Amino acid sequence: MSHVFGRGTGALPTAVRGDGCYLYDADGRAYLDGSGGAAVSCLGHSDPEVRAAIHAQLDKVAFAHTGFFTSEPAEALADLLVNQAPEGIDKVYLLSGGSEAVEAAIKLARQYFLEIGEPGRHRLIARRQSYHGNTLGALAAGGNAWRREKYAPLLVETSHIAPCFEYRERRDNESPEAYGQRAANELEAEIERLGPETVMAFIAEPVVGATAGAVPAVPGYFKRIREICDRYGVLLILDEVMCGIGRTGSFFACEQDGIAPDIVTVAKGLGAGYMPIGAMLCSGAIHDAIAQGSGSFQHGHTYHAHPLSAAAGHAVVQAILGRSLVDRVQRQGETLNGTLCDAFGQHANVGDIRGRGLFRGVELVEDRETKRPFDPARKLHAKVKSAAMKEGLIVYPAGGTVNGRDGDHILIAPPFIIEDAQIDELVAKLGRALETTLA
Ligand code: PMP
């Protein structure tokens, strides 16, 4: 009997080895990692340079508390990230994962307004059907009804506006641009409703991942969001924990939306699965207000900026940049999208295929024309996941549409090193998993 208390249900295979795009279980069975776990393993499972960097750092120094020391890999990683970051972003706070990065972002926003003498600003606006993490602050920000409901009494009240889900919300006679403006204007209405002097920040995923299966916003949506934030002095926090670090075909996903946030979070792809790491990046203006005010950000975790994690993150970012993997994500992303559309574009139960780069989602619906979702009680996305595992394929079941609990999406986010033949293998195995599940 296993004493490990974890997330998976039922008997799970034991992962004993990873090689490139494959994981192997104790019986020697191979699983093609079609989702990088959950958009994590962007370099595959056995990258020699990342492994060497971790070993080298371990041989130098494993831990030095950030209250006393900085470290070479933390400094080097922060430099690399700032070089890639959107305009105005020039400070990096290293953490151990995505939820920690989001918590830090929320607290930084609050402290900023205290420092600049606007203590009334404490409210956060987020979007329905978003995911920002599992700790209480990040869970309060998240807009997935099912994830929140058990913990509702513990969660800080947060407003949730509609996400920008063109495939579901755009009216027949509406252009994508007009729809984007309409969706973004919900933010303005909510700020006005709450009172601008009470609103601290708006948080959103540029491409919605875990709850919706890789849904990007329509062009112009985030530009309008940026304008609204600027007009009301509200900070814009972008959560790129899942979609950042090259995953969508640009180093930061928001580059493709043509905007720069005030604060941005990254995690999964940053450690690429080799070490736990996340980061919260912020503008110089926010940092300086705090530095010149009370002096320091009142936050910290024992393991933040851990040297081994930073060494892994630095090696990952170097690999992505040095091997031109962002360009590769664009190319392989087009191939993946084409292969998915050829295989499932006309499928009776596929409502939408969307995404950017190597971050793609397949929406499963009962009725292709009306896009009526399947009965949530069927938990179809979870069944597709299990059927895919039987085929030797890992894909991520992204559940929750409309009210945060209906709807079935399959998230596909393979390692950036995926080859054409492996894309064919992924789509063929997913096709068989869908057939078994829908039969
Ligand atoms: N934000 C987003 C957008 C995420 O997708 C996730 C993880 N799925 C998180 C935050 C939380 O990250 P972690 O699981 O590393 O705490």
Image (spheres, helix red, strand yellow):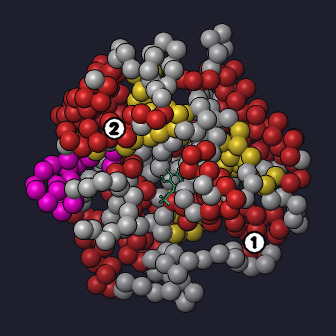
Is 14 situated left or right of 149 in this image?
left
Q: Residue at x 82, y 52 (%)?
A: 199
Q: Quadrant of the N terminus?
A: bottom left
Q: Secondary structure at mark 2?
A: helix
Residue 142, percent across and down? 61, 50
Pointer 1 residue: 290
Residue 343 vs 399, above or below: the answer is above
Give the mark, 2 or 1, whose residue is nearer the N terminus.
1
Mark 2 or 1: the one toward you: 2
Pointer 2 residue: 383
Q: Residue at x 44, y 40 (%)?
A: 398
Quick one: 301 or 386, which is closer to the camera? 386
Question: What amino acid is found at the position of numbered circle 1 in the picture?
Answer: Ile
Q: Residue at x 54, y 23 (%)?
A: 167
Q: Quadrant of residue 345?
A: top left
Question: What amino acid is found at the position of numbered circle 2 in the picture?
Answer: Lys
Range drawn in magenta: 14-36
Magenta span includes 38: no
Quick one: 43 or 120, which is closer to the camera? 120
